[in-house]
């Protein structure tokens, strides 16, 4: 949880319209650090270079409040932006991340926040990872969250 190493910008910016949620939810294993970033992406659907806007600014702002009030006592932002975190979560569905947080956090009182607070935490985590806000709200619905993949924004094109 405290590595400062950031992976090279090899992450593709993708939104995979197809669901990639393959029943791996709740897996609590640590990331396999030997895996390359590229293999954490599951090319099981159409890859669309992303400027996908999966949440609204208002949701992220509320998520930031949740983070400050509830999460920051134990976490630093790098806990959800580090190479370890990305290796584990990039390429998986937002539902997997949402469920992981909803069922295990806060670590000392899991499940005690509202669905909206958990959802907005996810929006804030997307923002912390550099994904842009837009007009469309993220919705706390298993089907729609399952259809969205945690993907990072494209690195700037090299000239
Ligand atoms: C009381 C301390 C505590 C609080 C409060 C807390 N967490 Fe955690 N969190 C932990 C610990 C400890 C772990 C590591 C658990 C593990 O790796 O098994 C963790 C792990 C996580 C992970 C998984 C990180 C990874 O690398 O996969 C996420 C995401 C997360 N927390 C989000 C949150 C959010 C969002 C909140 C606020 C709603 C929150 N946590 C509040 C202690 C806390």
Image (cartoon, rainbow, N blue to C red):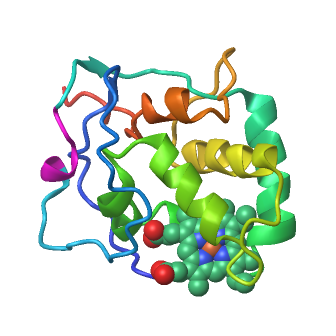
Position of 1 relative to 104 (above/below): below
Position of the C terminus by quadrant: top left
Residue span colored magenta: 38-43
Q: Residue at x 65, y 29 (%)?
A: 138
Q: Residue at x 59, y 51 (%)?
A: 125
Q: How many marks?
A: 0
Q: Residue at x 74, y 70 (%)?
A: 71
Q: Decide whether residue 41 is among the magenta residues.
A: yes
Most foreground residue, 72 or 23: 23
Position of 97 relative to 20 (above/below): below
Q: Residue at x 37, y 38 (%)?
A: 151
Q: Residue furthest front?
A: 23
Image x and y of residue 30, in percent = 32, 77
Q: Quadrant of residue 116?
A: top right
In the figure, is residue 120 to the left or right of 80? right
Position of 62 relative to 27 (above/below): above
Most foreground residue, 3 or 159: 3
Asked if residue 1 can be seen in this view, the reply is: no
Q: Residue furthest top?
A: 135
In the figure, is residue 53 to the left or right of 120? left
Most foreground residue, 19 or 13: 19
Image x and y of residue 135, in percent = 69, 14
Image x and y of residue 42, in percent = 19, 40
In the figure, is residue 7 to the left or right of 2? left
**Quadrant of the rendered image holding ligand 1:** bottom right
Q: Quadrant of residue 29?
A: bottom left
Image x and y of residue 142, in percent = 55, 36
Q: Quadrant of residue 127?
A: top right
In the figure, is residue 15 to the left or right of 111? left
Asked if residue 58 can be seen in this view, the reply is: yes
């Amino acid at each position: 949880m405290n590595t400062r190493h950031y992976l090279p910008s090899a992450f593709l910016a993708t939104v995979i319209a197809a669901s990639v949620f393959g029943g791996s939810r709740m897996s609590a294993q640590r990331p396999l650090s030997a895996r390359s970033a590229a293999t954490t992406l599951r090319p099981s659907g159409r890859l669309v270079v992303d400027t996908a806007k999966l949440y609204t600014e208002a949701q992220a702002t509320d998520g930031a409040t949740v983070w400050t009030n509830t999460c920051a006592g134990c976490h630093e932002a790098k806990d959800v932006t580090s190479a370890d975190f990305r290796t584990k979560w990039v390429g998986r569905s937002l539902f997997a991340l949402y469920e992981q947080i909803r069922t295990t956090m806060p670590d000392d009182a899991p499940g005690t926040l509202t669905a909206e607070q958990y959802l907005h935490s996810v929006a804030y985590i997307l923002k912390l990872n550099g994904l842009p806000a837009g007009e469309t709200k993220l919705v706390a619905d298993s089907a729609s969250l399952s259809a969205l993949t945690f993907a990072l924004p494209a690195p700037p094109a090299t000239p």
